[in-house]
Image: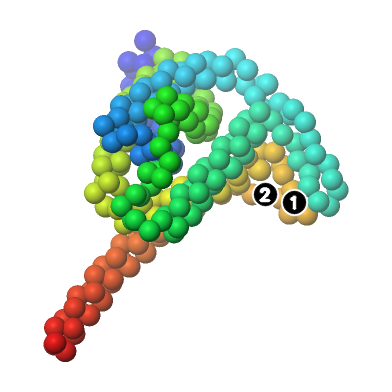
Amino acid sequence: MELFTVAGLSTLGMLVILQAVLGFDNLLYISIESKRAPADRQQYVRRMGIGLAIGLRIVLLFGVMTLIDKVQAPLFGLDFEGVLTGEFTLHSLITLVGGVFIIYTAVKEITHMLAIDDVGQGIGNHRKKSVAGIIFWIVLMNLVFSFDSILSAMALTKSISIMVVAIVLSGVMMIWLADHVAEFLKRNRMYEVLGLFILLIVGMMLLGEGGHLSHLALFDYHVEQMAKSTFYFTIAVLVAVDLVQSRYRKKLLAQRAEEMQRSA
């Protein structure tokens, strides 16, 4: 009954907003990864991947609540004095591996876009995957992105019902937004590059977070976590630069076309 109180509903609202904000990077990955599927199966891949991830995220919620101490307990450490030191937990390892994978995906796609002769191929078209394989990666990366949102939710409330409802509502919202983001990238191909560089920054953010959780130090320099405010400010600057540059390019092209007409 706590869910139907004023405090419960306000907490639910905050959790849904939190899930939506923290799920932005996940949403971008889903939209890009789904483009590896055949065109007529891309929407199915996104919806099935997110749907399965919702169920597994609820399972993960119960698992984290039960094993919170073990998830954050040190597994092993590295102590190469002056070179590499750190103490790794399950949480930090999952975050680090997820960051490496995201960076690898973004760099691979950027390299492909620079290498192709036919720009019509776009993101993900150079190497199609099976539908099951794409769904697997969407679900897996969804779980990687889920750790922060689940831990943040646990800090706001102890009510399992509120957290479960928030997960389901945010999942439904992600299914709706994923189709719109994918359609936007399809109609506006120029923003594919912007999306890949945002994904690259997401990977760096995950590496920083994992390194911070592991108390990782390289040559006595500690790895610091990127603040969420810094991340979103960087994204805003990237989007603003891309929009300004696009408008400026259109003006230059129009001016050049006018000059060619005059000279002709």
Measured from the top left, where is residue 225 in percent x and y? Answer: 60, 47
| Tag 2 residue | 223
Left or right position of 216 against 25:
right
Q: Identify the amino acid type marked 2.
A: Val
Dot 1 crowding, Cα within 10 Å, few <14, some 14–19, many 20+: some
Q: In this view, does 28 lie to the left or right of 99?
A: left
Q: Identify residue for label 1.
A: 218
Q: Mark on residue 200? A: none
Mark 2, other Cα within 10 Å: few <14 / some 14–19 / many ≥20: some
Mark 1: which secondary structure?
A: strand
Q: How many labels does the image show?
A: 2
Which residue is at 71% across, 50% downward?
222
Q: In this view, does 43 lie to the left or right of 261?
A: right
Q: Judge whether 106 appears above or below 246 on screen.
A: above
> What residue is shown at x 30% (from left), y 27% (from top)?
44
Please tell me which residue lies in front, 104 or 195. 104
* 241 versus 54 height, above or below: below
Foreground of the two, 137 or 164 = 137
Asked whether, in this view, residue 105 is left or right of residue 219, the answer is: left
Residue 71 shows up from this direction = yes
Q: Residue furthest right?
A: 81
Of callouts 1 and 2, the N-terminal one: 1
